[in-house]
Amino acid sequence: MDNKDLALYPYVAEASRYVESLDFSLDSLISSRAMDSARARGKERVLQSIAGEIVKPPLSNSDDRKILIELLSYPFSRILVSCIDDPFLTRRYSLAEAVASYKSLKVMDIAFLGEFSLDFNIHAEKKESAARIHFTDYIRLASSLKAMEWKLVNRKMDHGYVTVSREEFARLLQEGVRHRIEGSLPMKVPGEVCLSCQPYIADIMTALNERKSRFESSEFQTVEAGLFPPCITRAISQSQAGVNLAHSMRFAMTSFLLGIGMSVDDIMNLFTSSPDFDVDKARYQVEHIAGSSGTSYKPPSCATMQTYGNCYAPDETCKRISHPLNYYRRRVWFNNRDVQKEKEEQPSDDPAPIP
Ligand code: SF4
């Protein structure tokens, strides 16, 4: 890889060796005036990941200074993420770095992807305009991809090798990058280094808290469990009784509860009785549905719920709606109206006006 590529993919072993050869100390990265731009870009990387996308600057091999800033900004952004040590930020940052890499990888040729993948211990073979990778490597990279087309049973296998298109290869490598970055964070950073980084950390914390609160905001002021549709009520009680919910029902329940304003933590508490409960996996899934990757998911309509066998004991209100969220909206509206009416009909404690 040339230096421009090392700046684009600063987590590969060759980039680390290159940075080491430059002989910059941690001290100079944290406090030297000459490193101002690298630190500013490192902070920007983290802020952009919170906003949803790390934007890579256009680079050419003659841009020595820009390349250096981009390269050194990466370890600084990792220091910031490590000092903050927030699982949501770590996941979001790792994903954003991986997606930024995917965007440049998907336009590279198979030969480059093959060379890049060696860093991840993948020995791909070129096959015309596609690549063949061993099924064990394929499973390792594709296991977190949920779409049906990534399931091994839906791929053609030839003597233990799976053929993937150039874009698919880049997408699989995105997963490799994400696992590598996420798995290496948080780093152990000395307390005094985190202290020196406080001015950068303060801005990131503001953006992070604002982003998290957006997940948790909702049109509904309070959560009224007694007004949930029958399908969601049943899913919650099954979950609390330790019944393992089908994936589609778990998704419907989570997206519904997020949609009415429940926090990620409160939803996590509902799942703790599930027999296959894995706290990290569950949190990742709930945050993903809440929008940690930039897309927040809406609950499925009643028609989709019916298709997957998740519509349970529809009642009178169900006859008037076509979406579980509308069920809740309707019940909340009528409930508020009844409460208001009751208040108005209650006799006043004020003394009657003197005629
Ligand atoms: S009709 Fe809709 S809201 Fe009612 S139980 Fe079925 S899926 Fe749920």
Image: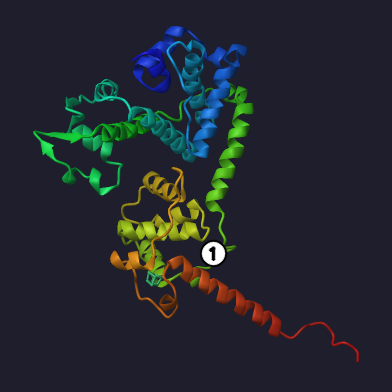
Q: Nearer the viewer, residue 155 or 166?
A: 166
User: Going by the picture, which residue comes out furthest to the right?
Assistant: 355
Query: Could you tell me residue 70's position as x and y percent?
Result: 48, 19
Give left or right: position of 83 versus 133: right
Asked if residue 290 shows in the view, the reply is: yes
* Callout 1: SS: loop
Give above or below for 172 relative to 39.
below
Query: Could you tell me residue 333's position as x and y percent?
Result: 57, 73
Give above or below for 76 relative to 149.
above
Give above or below for 134 relative to 7.
below
Quarter of the rendering occupied by the N terminus: top left
Q: Which residue is mark 1?
A: 223
What residue is rendered at 25% in x and 48% in y?
148
Q: Nearer the viewer, residue 31 or 53?
A: 53
What residue is rendered at 43% in x and 11% in y?
20
Quadrant of the picture in which ligand 1 is shown: bottom left
- Quarter-of-image position of residue 8: top left
Quarter of the rendering occupied by the C terminus: bottom right
Mark 1 Cα shell of 10 Å, populated few (<14), some (14-19), many (≥20)? some
Give left or right: position of 53 versus 344: left
Asked if residue 183 shows in the view, the reply is: no
Query: Could you tell me residue 272's position as x and y percent?
Result: 40, 54
Q: Nearer the viewer, residue 343 or 299?
A: 299
What residue is rendered at 34% in x and 70% in y?
311
Q: Disc 1 residue type?
A: Val
